[in-house]
Amino acid sequence: MPTVEVRAPATTANLGPGYDCLGMALDLWNRITVETQSGGGEPSVEVVGEGAGELAADAENLTYRAMAFLYGEADEELPPLRMRCENTVPLSRGLGSSAAAISGGLVAANSLLGDPFSPNDLLEMAATIEGHPDNVAAAVHGGLQLVVLDDQQLYTAAIDVPEDLQAVLFIPDRRIATVDARRVLPAEVSVADAVYNMSRAALLVAGMQSNHPEYLSIATQDRLHQPYRQSIFPPMKVIFEAARNAGALGVFLSGSGSTILSLTKDRSMTVAYEMFDAARLAGVDGRVEITRPTDRGAHVQSVGGS
């Protein structure tokens, strides 16, 4: 039976000021293997790694639901299948675990059907399933993506990222649900705060595109969401300070948290140690990981069977 193996990346969203409009793929991957089966019956879904014993292992699995969504868009019936999800992207940590699941499922289903849909089609589907486009834009297209939703139409623009840029992640054991992180945000903001964020989001894009890392310290600052989210994760402030004092180019809450991400070029180990130590002193358990942005989105790793 036909088999397809897909890799889907972790992603970070917002990057500080780019609330709901900036997303970047990271070199940290989930692997999804799908094998179609003859006959009928319920799908067989196995989850190993992150989310094992917790994520749905049946037709309610998000990756499976993404596959079913694409087959529906193609007016095809999803065949019986066996799926194995090997997850390394942590859940509810602001690293796009749902975007990885959705994009991986869409790419796998598209491959099984002979790739009738374009990457932009896949992004439209992913954003519909996810409900917001920033993580899925990076998960589908890879790299750093600026995404704008206008009258139900998505527009994306890829932004160059310096090749030697690294990402230092402090991943707390504590989870933060996206719905809880959105609940603490105000319904309205001042003009001053809006201008503050617009100017820094623009500077962030310019700094990345022109390889001016000295801009990133200012360009990753934010007044729209991080100050409010600190109320549900108070140690964020001291971990930010530790990263900056250790030489991070910029630091921000990854997505809605709880992961804190620092951008570095040559002090990654020092920044990682200081972030971890500051978190420990604040009573926050977790781990650090050093990775880098990747220009690849979810993609087919191999195809087999007949």
Image (spheres, rainbow, N blue to C red):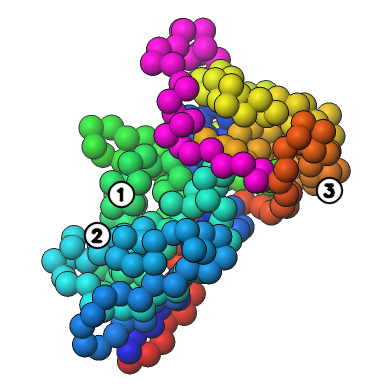
Residue 221 image position (x, y, % from top left): 63, 24
Q: Mark 2 points at which residue?
A: 69
Residue 1 image position (x, y, % from top left): 32, 89
Kind of residue at disc 3: Met
Can residue 156 be seen here? The reply is yes
Residue 249: name its quadrant: top right
Any mark on residue 269, and which?
3
Q: Residue at x 39, y 72 (%)?
A: 45
Residue 101: name its quadrant: bottom left
Residue 88 on the magenta span: no
Residue 286 image position (x, y, % from top left): 71, 46
Task: Name the one closer to the observer, 140 or 2.
Answer: 2
The kind of secondary structure element at disc 1 is helix
State which quarter of the image contains the C terminus.
Answer: bottom left
The kind of secondary structure element at disc 3 is helix
Kind of residue at disc 2: Phe
Can residue 114 be seen here? The reply is no
